[in-house]
């Protein structure tokens, strides 16, 4: 869950039906969008966070250390909340192969998700998907089977 600049992880206690805060961390920025995703063949969920710093970050919750750990960080634009700088919208391929980050106007980037030699998630260089003269209200990831996302 996101509260402006605070990331919170909640857990549901099945025996009582209560929702309890398990972990909270200050992000020291405005979190514009947050999205969970699971890479193909993986058993854990990761978070993609877009903030006003102009960066997209992949976070993993480490149970042993009880904290979020940065898996990968990629710069996509200028800092600040601007309508032409991507970060307002996030969408992911349901199979966990790609994510798209978009602005209200102009900028749209697609990142392919892979693993490095150590097995850690990494993000490819951005693929530009800009289109002039459009206004974006929302984006959504669609299941395209095993075709190119």
Image (cartoon, rainbow, N blue to C red):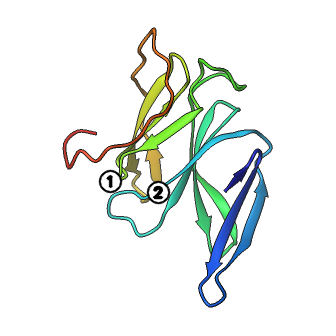
Question: Which element is circle 2 on?
Answer: loop
Number of labelled discs?
2
The earlier-in-sequence mark between 2 and 1 is 1
Label 1: which residue? 95
Q: Is residue 103 above or below residue 92?
A: above
* Residue positioned 62% across, 74% down in the render: 63
Residue 125, visible in the rendered structure? no
Q: Nearer the viewer, mark 2 or mark 1?
A: 1
Asked if labels 1 and 2 touch by Cβ distance under 8 angstroms, the answer is no
Label 2: which residue? 120
- Which residue is at the front of the view, 115 or 49? 49
Where's residue 92, x and y in %?
Answer: 42, 45
- Which residue is at the front of the view, 8 or 104? 104
Q: Residue furthest bottom?
A: 15
- Which residue is at the front of the view, 99 or 131? 131
Residue 21, visible in the rendered structure? yes
* Residue positioned 63% across, 20% down in the render: 83
Where's residue 48, x and y in %?
Answer: 55, 48
């Amino acid at each position: 869950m996101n509260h402006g600049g605070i990331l919170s992880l909640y857990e549901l206690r099945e025996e009582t039906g209560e929702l309890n805060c398990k972990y909270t961390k200050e992000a020291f920025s405005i979190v514009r969008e947050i999205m969970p995703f699971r890479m193909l063949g993986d058993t854990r969920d990761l978070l993609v966070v877009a903030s006003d710093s102009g960066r997209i970050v992949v976070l993993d919750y480490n149970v042993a250390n009880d904290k979020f750990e940065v898996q990968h960080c990629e710069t996509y634009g200028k800092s600040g909340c601007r309508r032409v700088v991507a970060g307002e919208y996030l969408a992911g391929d349901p199979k966990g192969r790609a994510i798209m980050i978009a602005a209200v106007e102009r900028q749209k980037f697609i990142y392919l998700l892979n693993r490095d030699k150590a097995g850690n998630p990494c993000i490819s260089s951005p693929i530009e998907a800009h289109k002039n003269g459009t206004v974006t209200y929302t984006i959504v990831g669609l299941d395209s089977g095993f075709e190119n996302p």
